[in-house]
Amino acid sequence: MVTKSAQETQKLGEKIANQLIIKRQPLIIALTGELGSGKTTFLQGLAKGLGIKERILSPTFIMMRQYPLVINHQPSIISFYHIDLYRVEDEKDIEGLGLEEIWSDPENIIAIEWAEKIKKILPKKRIDIHFKYLKDDKREIKVTNVY
């Protein structure tokens, strides 16, 4: 898919969120692509589609933010985790974050920016989304490994 503006990238994220079927299994979304390719913009739309009202900012310095979901206007035990690994060199840098516990919980939806940095430990069951900057406001977005 090719989006032609930040708004289109956000709308795509919102559309994908609306298509997600929340099953009793964790949902991991691994986002890859160069700096400025649209990952955070996409996640802002995804979060909106999941019903999150808070402004989504990339947690570059703290690495992870948790947002409770509201389903059918009711608080839920399901959480959305936004993880940003921009400052991470490899898997050793995330020890202590509890990622394996987070992504094994069937009540969680986890989106990981810069997921390629921990590809050796990512669960095989996940959605991979690759972002590529084309020119101006155009982005190519490829969704693969959907389970």
Image: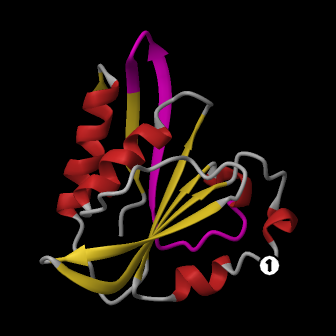
For the view shown, which residue lies furthest in the top direction? 136
Q: Is residue 126 magenta?
A: yes
Q: Dot 1: what SS? A: loop
Percent x, y of residue 11: 23, 39
Q: Quadrant of residue 24?
A: bottom left
* Foreground residue among 103 and 130: 103
For the view shown, which residue lies furthest in the front direction? 54
Q: Residue at x 40, y 49 (%)?
A: 55
* Foreground residue among 44 and 147: 44
Badge 1 is on which residue? 96
Q: Residue at x 42, y 88 (%)?
A: 106
Q: Quadrant of residue 26?
A: bottom left
Q: Is residue 137 magenta?
A: yes
Task: Give the side of residue 60 with respect to residue 94, left or right.
Answer: left
Residue type highlighted by circle 1: Gly
Task: Give the side of residue 101 with respect to residue 82, left or right.
Answer: right
The region drawn magenta spans: 119-139
Q: Note whether 10 is above or below 27 in the view shown.
A: above
Q: Is residue 1 visible?
A: no
Q: Is residue 58 visible?
A: yes
For the view shown, which residue lies furthest in the left direction? 72
Instruction: Categorize mark 1 by other alpha carbons within 10 Å: few (<14), some (14-19), many (20+).
Output: few
Percent x, y of residue 44: 37, 46
Q: Note whether 69 is above or below 31 in the view shown.
A: below
Q: Residue at x 36, y 82 (%)?
A: 78
Percent x, y of residue 108: 43, 79
